[in-house]
């Protein structure tokens, strides 16, 4: 039987000091160093955390690869302004995720631009708007029974996920290292962030991806996850500075991200 606790107690990290160009990011800066330590601890202990920041500065987005999974977005005519709003949102999420990855690179002991270039300098991304229906209490059913899963337990395929969730519906659960399911309560002004399978490989297992699931509640819930992924054709293998000692002491099997994600999508949705 799964054990579920009432609160997740995920760390809340202000990533404001990381909101700089890589050339201006100084790991010796005390504020930057504090964020790096917080990210390192959060990624090692749970793989989930909240982030918030101030004064978002937009940058021109790089061209994004899509390859086999690419198709023109089918934008709805209503509500009015949906398309420009989400196009702007994608730019902001890409920029935010890149800042977080700079901090994670430093936390792992590498340069802040370790995930740029051929690794994730031209990131494949996926944005979803997901509606979870409310739990239905059938006649004669136990109203105190555990809610059914709106999304079964899984780890994310890619690099980093940023989730914008309804402020008044708690439905996301994370499995901690002790095997307990923890509720992830919405925090005003913050995104829920979790690391994916590709970061587990690049970090050589130092930062493991974490099982999580969604449990339907009594209210309809909307979640907007943004999946920040490696370059589609990136060869993902443990980074040199994550392999201790001389020789090949890597513990994770390398993959080509594009082949990996296509296989996962066909297996789960095909």
Image (cartoon, grey):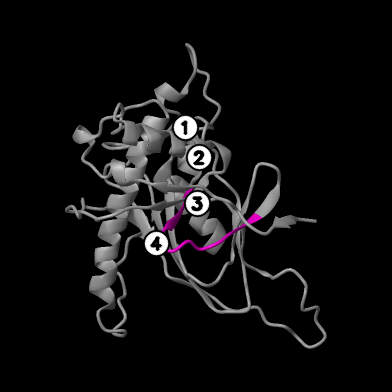
- The x, y position of residue 36, in whole percent, is 39, 35
Q: Secondary structure at mark 1?
A: loop
Mark 4: few, some, or many residues within 10 Å (few <14, many ≥20)? few
Left or right placement of residue 157 versus residue 103 in this view: right
Magenta stretch holds residue 186: yes
- Secondary structure, mark 2, is helix
Q: Are marks 2 and 1 in contact (CB under 8 Å)?
A: yes
Any mark on residue 263, and which? 3
For the question of whether residue 264 can be seen, the reply is yes
Q: Which residue is mark 2?
A: 43
| Quarter of the view holding residue 102 | top left
Answer yes or no: do the residues labelled 3 and 2 have beta carbons within 8 Å?
Answer: no
Badge 2: few (under 14), some or many (20 or more) residues near its Cα, within 10 Å? many
Q: Residues within 10 Å of mark 1 (few under 14, many from 20)?
A: many
Residue placed under numbered mark 4 in the picture:
189
- Disc nearer the start of the sequence (2/4): 2
Element on which disc 4 rests: loop
Residue 6 lies left or right of residue 100; in this view the side is: right
The first of marks 2 and 1 along the sequence is 2
Q: Which residues are magenta?
A: 182-194
Q: Say which quadrant the N terminus sits in.
A: bottom right
Asked if disc 2 and disc 4 are in contact, CB closer than 8 Å, the reply is no
Mark number for residue 203? Answer: 1
């Amino acid at each position: 039987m799964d054990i579920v606790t009432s609160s997740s107690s995920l760390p809340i990290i202000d990533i404001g000091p990381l909101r700089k160009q890589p050339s201006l990011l100084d790991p010796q800066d005390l504020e930057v160093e504090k964020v790096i330590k917080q990210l390192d601890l959060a990624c090692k202990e749970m793989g989930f955390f909240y982030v918030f920041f101030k004064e978002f500065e937009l940058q021109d987005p790089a061209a994004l690869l899509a390859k086999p999974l690419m198709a023109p977005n089918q934008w709805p005519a209503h509500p009015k302004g949906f398309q420009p709003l989400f196009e702007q949102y994608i730019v902001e999420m890409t920029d935010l995720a890149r800042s977080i990855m700079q901090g994670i690179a430093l936390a792992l002991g590498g340069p802040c631009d370790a995930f740029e270039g051929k690794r994730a300098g031209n990131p494949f991304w996926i944005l979803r708007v997901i509606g979870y229906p409310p739990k239905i209490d059938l006649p004669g059913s136990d109203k105190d029974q555990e809610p059914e899963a709106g999304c079964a337990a899984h780890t994310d395929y890619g690099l980093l996920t940023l989730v914008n969730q309804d402020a008044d519906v708690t439905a996301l659960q994370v499995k901690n290292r002790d095997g307990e399911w923890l509720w992830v309560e919405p925090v005003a002004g913050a995104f829920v962030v979790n690391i994916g399978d590709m970061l587990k490989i690049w970090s050589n297992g130092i930062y493991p991806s974490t099982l999580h699931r969604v449990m339907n509640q009594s209210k309809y819930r909307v979640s907007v996850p943004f999946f920040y992924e490696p370059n589609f054709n990136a060869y993902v293998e443990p980074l040199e500075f994550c392999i201790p000692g001389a020789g090949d002491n890597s513990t994770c099997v390398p993959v080509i991200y594009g082949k990996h994600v296509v296989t996962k999508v066909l297996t789960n949705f095909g």
